[in-house]
Image (spheres, rainbow, N blue to C red):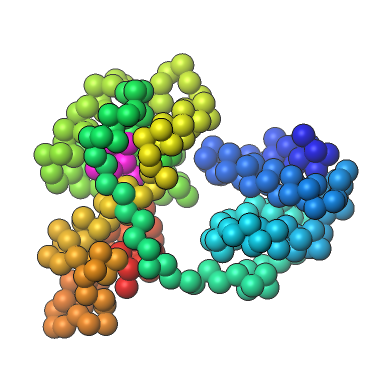
Amino acid sequence: MTPLQWDIYKLLRVNRDGSRTTQYQRKMMAFRFAKDIDALGCRGIRLPSIGNRHVNKAVDRWKQQGLSDATIMNRLSAIRWIGHKIGKPNLGLNNNRAFGLNGKTQTTVNRAQRLTVSVTGKVTDPYIRVGFKVQAAFGLRRSEAMKIQPRWADRGTKLVLKGSWTKGGRPREIPIRTAYQRGVLEEAKRIAGNGSLIPAHKSYREHLHSWEHATRKAGLSKTHGLRHAYAQSRYYELTGWKSPMQGGPSRDTLIGNQHELDIQARQQIAEELGHARITITYVYLGR
């Protein structure tokens, strides 16, 4: 551990903002920043000496490594959090464009991933296997598919998520519409009992490592693609046509009441995915 990583570790230990997932991701991004700063020749530097000249060096390095703007912006958010905690609110600046980053770049790559029998067959851990299925069936985030308590969440015609399971602490409801969803939920209830889809003998972090290993073994780049597939299936169900991301008509070519139907479908999907803004559906569905 470098001196800077040690300083960051102590800072994180006494500032536990956000969910466990947020805390873990923040730690990984902050440690990555510290390691890169060390590799760039700033060995032995301590947290009070960190400034935007170091942030600029790190961002340049990440760009050279081919990281996406979105990934770099996530790392900058962790750096800004650190800045606020140590009395340097300008650390990381407050404008991604100052680093030549564009947060509004629209991807045209369809990241949807379908869950197949061949994929789940490679997963030996029953908690993770059914966690994959729950994520695909209900469009959950990875952390939600681990924290969910299936027996508590099952309300007959809807799946209810507690705020403590979700990103941003926003509780939400997802309709249970299909026999496949019902079957997956019953399987999850059998495995979890009265608990969550994290085995009782494991911590969240330990189970996350197991999940990531299982993801690689199953040949999935990231299970977040299951959320994309859920959104696209829901869009077709609600509108009757494929989303632009799947080759369907773009929003500016819709005619008549198709515009209103598109808006209604996107709003419904955004709510089911746990987002407040309809524009987030552009990432999943295209525009």
- Magenta stretch, main secondary structure, is helix
Q: Position of residue 80 (x, y in %)?
A: 68, 57
Q: Where is residue 27 in the image (x, y as percent from the top left)?
A: 64, 41
- Image quadrant in which you'd find residue 140: top left
Asked if 174 appears above or below 92 in the picture, the reply is: above
* Residue for point 36% across, 50% down: 225
Screen quadrant of the N terminus: top right
* Residue for point 31% across, 49% down: 113
* Residue for point 46% across, 16% down: 201
Q: Say which of 137 and 171 sits in front.
A: 137
Asked if 239 appears above or below 226 in the picture, the reply is: below
Q: Say which of 171 and 167 sits in front.
A: 167
Q: How many labels does the image show?
A: 0
Q: Is residue 134 magenta?
A: yes
Q: Please give the range of residues in magenta.
A: 132-140
| Left or right: 62 in relation to 88 | left
| Left or right: 4 in relation to 154 | right
| Left or right: 257 in relation to 98 | left
Q: Say which of 93 and 283 sits in front.
A: 283
Q: Does the magenta stretch include residue 239?
A: no
